[in-house]
Image (cartoon, rainbow, N blue to C red):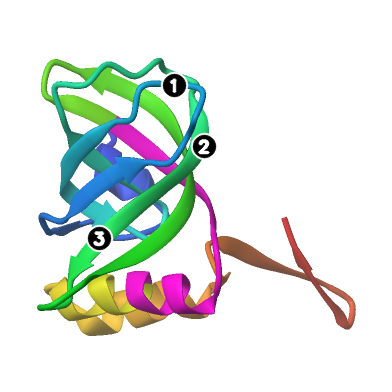
Amino acid sequence: MIDVADKREFTRVQIHIEVETDDDHIKTMHGETNNLSMGGFFVETRDKMEIGYEGKMELFLDGGFERVPIEVHGKVVRANKEGYGVEIVKVYGVDSYSHLKNLVMYNAPDFSKIQAEFDKHCGIRPIETRGQITVID
């Protein structure tokens, strides 16, 4: 049997930060991450979300006097009684990407493994080279 963690592109780190959806068309979701990677996170919440929901989500760093948002476009891909698995489809802005990357790097048990994962990706997408042109799928 193949371990699910072995099939993931990115290492998940155990970290608990606040998550909210930012969508006028649905009930806002509030929760806290259980784990996080460059490819997604699991959010613990009692709020109801539909599998397949996609929209802007914000993960908040506690910056002391203010909450610093990490803005992503997330897609709910699985659910259980504790919450929802969310795939990060895209990250909005360089600051959000940098904060997300730093969160993962500084909370990972193996820095060199995380660095190797970043080296294989352009942002959150794998790098595939065809000739002299780098293509982001």
Say whether residue 47 is magenta.
no
Q: Earlier in the sequence, mark 1 or mark 3?
A: 1
> Which secondary structure, mark 1?
loop
Say whether residue 89 is magenta.
yes
- Give the CA separation, mark 2 to mark 1: 10 Å
Residue labelled with disc 2: 55
Crowd class of label 3 (few under 14; some 14 to 19; many from 20; radius 10 Å): some
**Which quarter shows the C terminus?**
bottom right
> Which secondary structure, mark 2?
strand
Crowd class of label 1 (few under 14; some 14 to 19; many from 20; radius 10 Å): few
> Which secondary structure, mark 3?
strand
Q: Magenta region: which residues? A: 85-100
76 is higher (above) or lower (below) than 102: above
Residue labelled with disc 3: 60
Residue labelled with disc 1: 26
Residue depicted at 34% across the width and 19% down the height: 49
The type of residue carrying mark 3 is Phe
x%, y% of residue 6?
30, 48
x%, y% of residue 102?
29, 79
The type of residue carrying mark 2 is Gly
Q: Earlier in the sequence, mark 2 or mark 3?
A: 2
The type of residue carrying mark 1 is Ile
- Give the CA separation, mark 1 to mark 3: 20 Å
Comparing labels 2 and 1, the label whose residue is closer to the camera: 1
Q: Is residue 37 visible to the viewer in this orientation of the structure?
A: yes
Question: Do the CB atoms of the residues marked 2 and 1 lie less than 8 Å apart?
Answer: yes
49 is higher (above) or lower (below) than 19: above
